[in-house]
Image (cartoon, rainbow, N blue to C red):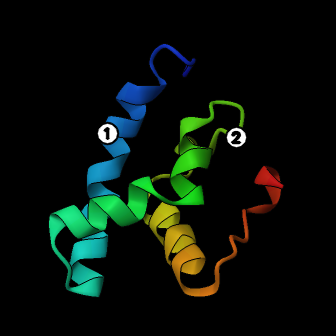
């Protein structure tokens, strides 16, 4: 079970995949990709254990981040609303 104490371990497992996908799909450096992620609303939701978005996995979180970066909005899956 994920709680606030071990949430950052889960995040540390998820974020490399998101960063890698940003680098590949946007042709940007690791530093640029990390900044995009860490400055996003998607990441803020990931840090909040109450949202439980960590369970979505990095491919879907990447898609949500891309939506946020492109449109300025996030369409959370129904269970996250």
Left or right for 46, reference 77 = left
Left or right for 16, reference 6 = left
Q: Residue at 52% across / 65% down in the picture?
A: 60
Q: In this view, does 21 lie above or below 35?
A: below
Query: Label 2 belongs to which residue?
Result: 51
Label 1: element kind = helix
| Residue 64 % position (x, y) | 57, 69
Number of numbered callouts drawn? 2
Mark 2 neighbour class, 10 Å CA radius: few under 14, some 14 to 19, many 20 or more: some
Image-quadrant location for residue 58: bottom left
| Residue 69 % position (x, y) | 52, 78
- Image quadrant holding the C terminus, namely bottom right
| Residue 11 % position (x, y) | 40, 38
Q: Residue at 17% across / 64% down in the picture?
A: 30
Left or right for 77, reference 35 = right
- Image quadrant holding the N terminus, namely top right
Q: Residue at 56% across / 18% down in the picture?
A: 4
The numbered mark at residue 13 is 1
The numbered mark at residue 71 is none
Mark 1 neighbour class, 10 Å CA radius: few under 14, some 14 to 19, many 20 or more: few
Image-quadrant location for residue 6: top left
| Residue 7 % position (x, y) | 48, 26
Label 1 near label 2: C-beta < 8 Å?
no
Label 2: element kind = loop
Q: Distance between the residues labelled 2 and 1?
A: 17 Å
Q: Which residue lies furthest to the left in this view?
A: 29
First of labels 2, 1 by sequence position: 1
Left or right for 77, reference 2 = right
Q: In this view, does 7 lie above or below 28?
A: above
């Amino acid at each position: 079970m994920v709680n606030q104490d071990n949430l950052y371990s889960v995040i540390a497992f998820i974020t490399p995949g998101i960063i890698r996908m940003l680098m590949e799909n946007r042709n940007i450096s690791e530093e640029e990709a990390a900044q995009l992620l860490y400055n996003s609303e998607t990441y803020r939701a990931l840090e909040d254990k109450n949202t439980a978005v960590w369970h979505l996995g990095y491919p879907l979180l990447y898609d949500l981040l891309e939506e946020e970066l492109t449109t300025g909005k996030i369409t959370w899956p129904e269970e996250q609303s």
